[in-house]
Image (cartoon, grey):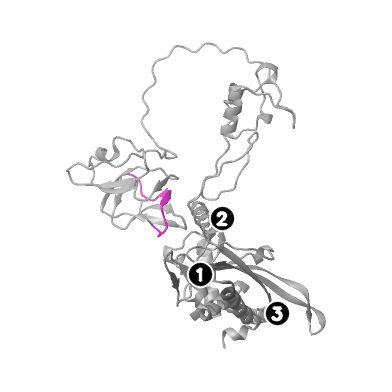
Amino acid sequence: MEALSPTMEEGRLVEWKKNEGDKVSTGDVLAEVETDKAVMELVARADGVLLKQLVAAGSTVPVSSLVAIIGQPGEDVSALTNGAGGGAAPAAKPAPTKPAAVAPAAPPTEKPAATVAATPAPAPTAPAPAPAPAPPTPSPAAPGARVKASPLARKIAAERGVDLGRVSGSGPEGRVIRRDLEGLAAAPAVPATGMPIQSAPGVAYTDVPLSQIRKTIAKRLAQSIGPIPTFYLTAEIDMERAWDARQALKALGPEGDVSFNDIIIKAAATALQQHPECNAWWQEDHIRVWNEVHIGMAVAIEEGLITPVIRHANLKSLRQISAESKDLAGRARERKLKPEEYTGSTFSVSNLGMFGIDEFTAIINPPEAGILAIGAIVQKAVVGDNAVVTRRRLRITMSCDHRVIDGATGAKFLKTLRTLLENPLAMVW
């Protein structure tokens, strides 16, 4: 299993593209692998024949673990598989014959979802005795009633996620016992591809396996919210002129169809150029202040969140940012981004305004020192020129890493950002 992205520690083998016995050449796609950010291709690094697949589709294995073996037709690879017969045995040192090219597999504790192994023939058994007459079928417990069940039945039900209140007990006085649970399936697990969760009768909950991206989100954000001393700055911005500017651009046709998120990214990139101390990374023993502005744009996908990067956003026109953001967001949802397209951002923007969220705080994506949380544009009654008027307003909250950004530093950045959004022509002046 290759490290297909800079942050990848394990991969889920989604689908094999070559079968055992197929000829392969260097560069041929062997399988599709879900990394922590995207679905990518695992390619052959040698010519030969795919002699053995050691990991079933759907299995998750660590980087550098054995997943398959490429060699010459008829070559003996038993030394590599330890006779596992398709299981996930650790790689053994190859024999001194012509070595096979190896692509790594799951550790011994990993159990592939569909491992095929030879099964010994069953020993002869005596004829089974005739079954005893079945006892009358009792009814399940009424909703809210106390369920009578043996301790073993309760343990089994807890492990399987079964609601005992929906199980008919056949023990004394309708008690649920072990045999009443034998025909019930465990709570269905959802594949890590983001398929809809389906409930089943008598099942109290559903265990959802973590996708690679969800594992990374959990790890990274726990790292962020814990050790990073974060503070928040909120500003309310008048968006009337930005609204008018967007309407004028839309009137130009499809090429003028920019979003408010595009406008905010452009404004943020311009403001960061003027306030480089906010365009920085915390590097433990030093602060890296970036001269280039690379904006991470948070995109919600089926399984979580990913931040494709608009590089050199401060040097791009609004039209270029709009076209690039549409392309990146579309491929992010298809899990088709390349590693260089979602790494290396110097500052991030997260927008939930389209979901009707007025205001929120976003979690910093380390090593970045700041992120903007964008709410919805709403019409409000405000006082202007000694009169109450209706204006379109936007609330923006900046999360700041206090190790890099002080309060006054972040406030100056937001002041510049407000000026740019309230006077869009300032971005092209």
Vertical relation: 375 (above or below) 78: below
Dot 2 amino acid type: Glu
Give the Cα distance between marks 1 and 3: 33 Å
Residue 77 pos. (x, y %): 25, 40
Q: Earlier in the sequence, mark 1 or mark 2?
A: 2
Relative placement, left or right, of 136 versus 107 is right
Residue drawn at x 56%, y 86% as measured from the top left: 428
Q: Which mark is residue 327?
A: none
Neighbour tally class for label 2: few under 14, some 14-19, many 20 plus, Cα within 10 Å: few
Q: Give the residue number, with chain letter if any, for mark 1.
A: 404
Q: Earlier in the sequence, mark 1 or mark 3?
A: 3
State the SS at label 2.
loop
Relative placement, left or right, of 380 versus 285 is right
Residue 202 pos. (x, y %): 65, 33
- All told, the count of numbered labels is 3
Q: Which residues are magenta?
A: 4-20
Neighbour tally class for label 1: few under 14, some 14-19, many 20 plus, Cα within 10 Å: many
